[in-house]
Image (cartoon, rainbow, N blue to C red):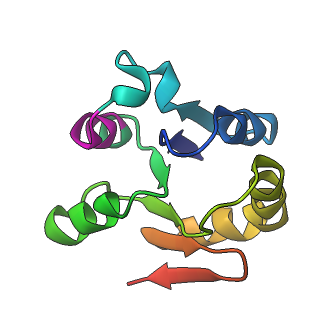
């Protein structure tokens, strides 16, 4: 599974996902780093078949309007510590992988995973 972690989330998340065998990158690794535009992030995600992981609802709006990015994980936890975020992903990674095998837009909160159709 290929993922691209957006700027509002810590690089530590992409590092954790790499440690679990995912092909993960963070916007800090892009040429404009965390100043990368949403359009550029979507372009890279589409070219490299990556799931965009973001807290930014603009990506969901863009998906509704244009179908891009073609796969999106919205993190709707509100303020959360990095340790809590990593724990949340560790606890739910297997399920997220399974859900992305058949779905395009998924949301994860502190208490649930929602598949958007």
Q: Position of residue 62 (x, y in %)?
A: 22, 61
Q: Residue furthest left?
A: 65
Q: Residue furthest front?
A: 79
Q: Nearer the viewer, residue 35 or 49?
A: 35
- Count of marks, rendered view: 0
Q: Quadrant of residue 47?
A: top left
Task: Indicate whether 8 appears above or below 100.
Answer: above
* Screen quadrant of the C terminus: bottom left
Task: Indicate whether 92 appears above or below 43.
Answer: below
Q: Which residues are magenta?
A: 37-44
Task: Indicate whether 62 appears above or below 86.
Answer: below
Q: Residue at x 49, y 64 (%)?
A: 74
The rendered magenta stretch, by its main secondary structure, is classed as: helix
Q: Residue furthest top?
A: 31
Horizontal side of 70 relative to 86 (left or right) equals left
Q: Position of residue 5 (x, y in %)?
A: 53, 42
Q: Residue at x 25, y 57 (%)?
A: 68
Q: Is residue 40 magenta?
A: yes
Horizontal side of 107 relative to 88 (left or right) equals left
Q: Residue at x 50, y 20 (%)?
A: 29
Q: Is residue 96 magenta?
A: no
Q: Position of residue 110 (x, y in %)?
A: 71, 75
Q: Residue at x 42, y 22 (%)?
A: 33
């Amino acid at each position: 599974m290929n993922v691209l972690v957006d700027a509002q989330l810590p690089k530590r998340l992409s590092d954790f996902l790499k440690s679990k065998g995912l092909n993960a990158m963070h916007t800090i690794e892009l040429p404009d780093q965390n100043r990368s535009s949403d359009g550029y992030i979507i372009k890279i995600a589409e070219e490299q078949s990556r799931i965009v992981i973001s807290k930014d609802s603009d990506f969901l709006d863009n998906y509704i309007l244009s179908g891009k990015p073609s796969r999106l994980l919205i993190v709707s936890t509100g303020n959360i510590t990095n340790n809590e975020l990593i724990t949340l992903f560790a606890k739910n990674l297997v399920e997220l992988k399974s859900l992305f095998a058949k779905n395009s837009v998924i949301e994860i909160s502190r208490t649930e995973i929602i598949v958007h159709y």
